[in-house]
Amino acid sequence: MKTYSFQAMGSRILIAMDTESTDFVSMTGQATAWFEEWEQIFSRFRLTSELNEVNRTSGKWTQVSETFWAVLNISLKNKEMTHGLVTPEALNALERAGYSVSFEEMANHMESLLRQPILQSEGGEIELDDESRSIRLPQGRRIDLGGVVKGWAAWQTMLRLQKSAPVLVDAGGDIAISGFMNGNQPWPVGVTNPHDASQNLSLLMVSGGGLATSGRDYRKWQKEGRWQHHIIDPRIDKPAETDVLSATVFAKDLVTAEAYAKMGLILGSESARSELDTVEGLAYFLVLEDGTQISNYSFNEMVWNERWINQQKQISA
């Protein structure tokens, strides 16, 4: 097993490959370059990014790159899938809440958070022209694809590297897994306790797919004496008011897992259970503000326990 980590998209990126290949350094170097390329397209904290160029031209038709087009369409599909709760159109609300600089810089800009202008935008939907690969944002509307692009980037990196060896890519808690490790072994993945980041609440055995955690325990700050966080509820156009502190979801792909994790957090525990239970193949684990833990059968089946120990004994025999 070889591992490599680096910083990108405001997060720690970890790549683990079940290989002894001498090409590992070259492959991880490529992965670093991919993330840099994607960050230049999607970062709202880089003035020259493609995302910022699109936002500056709201109200006008703008032709975009194939990569931008693909991620935007995924984000709009997630919006439909989550009944509008997970949307790329939350940037104005996010900045009104105070998230106007990168999280790493926020401590040095707390005073400016009190002076954020309230931006207004026209109603209507984002318009798409498939033939010219162009989009038109309603006048004054701006988008942020950060909610989907990190998981998408992890998944794309996994797809590219899996040709060489079994691989796990962890982008700040959004985890893409290619399949079993060598020897038909699942990957052990810990689920962090949002009340104490030094501890894991459970250990999952994952054979492939996407695992995402959405939480309001880390990216939070104070504005006007109130705690704010980065998960916007579009129904109130503010950070979600919810009893869910963190939501972990497993799905067949990471982008789907990420969307439903955010949906689960925004909805709150009661509505989240009702909605997530209707999605086939989804495993979920909710940790509430008061420490209560809620999980479904599919999630419990992934947790390391006596059943897994017995299976390992059978394999060894």
Image: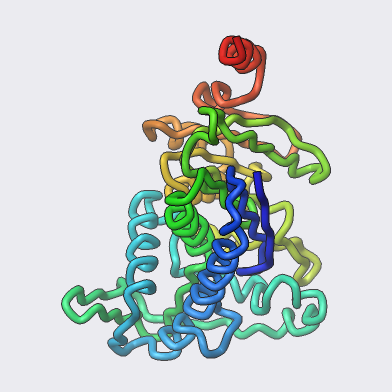
Residue 261, x across and y down, in percent: 53, 46
- Counting labels gives 0
Whether 196 is drawn above or below 281: the answer is: below
The answer to whether residue 263 of the structure is visible from this angle is: no
Rendered image quadrant of residue 138? bottom left
Q: Is residue 255 left or right of residue 200?
A: left
Residue sitting at the far left = 131
Scheme of colours in the image: rainbow
Residue sitting at the far front = 22
Whether 240 is drawn above or below 138: the answer is: above
Locate the N terminus and report the quarter of the image it occupies: top right
Residue 148, x across and y down, in percent: 48, 61
Residues 153 and 55: in front is 153
Q: Is residue 65 left or right of residue 238?
A: left
The answer to whether residue 60 of the structure is visible from this angle is: yes
Residue at 59 percent of width and 41 percent of height: 248
Residue 290, x across and y down, in percent: 75, 36
Residue at 36 percent of width and 60 percent of height: 74
Whether 306 is drawn above or below 264: the answer is: above
Residue at 44 percent of width and 57 percent of height: 160
Residues 111 and 301: in front is 301
Q: Is residue 233 left or right of residue 76?
A: right
Residue at 71 percent of width and 71 percent of height: 103
Q: Is residue 184 left or right of residue 10?
A: left
Residue 279, x across and y down, in percent: 38, 35
Locate the C terminus and report the quarter of the image it occupies: top right
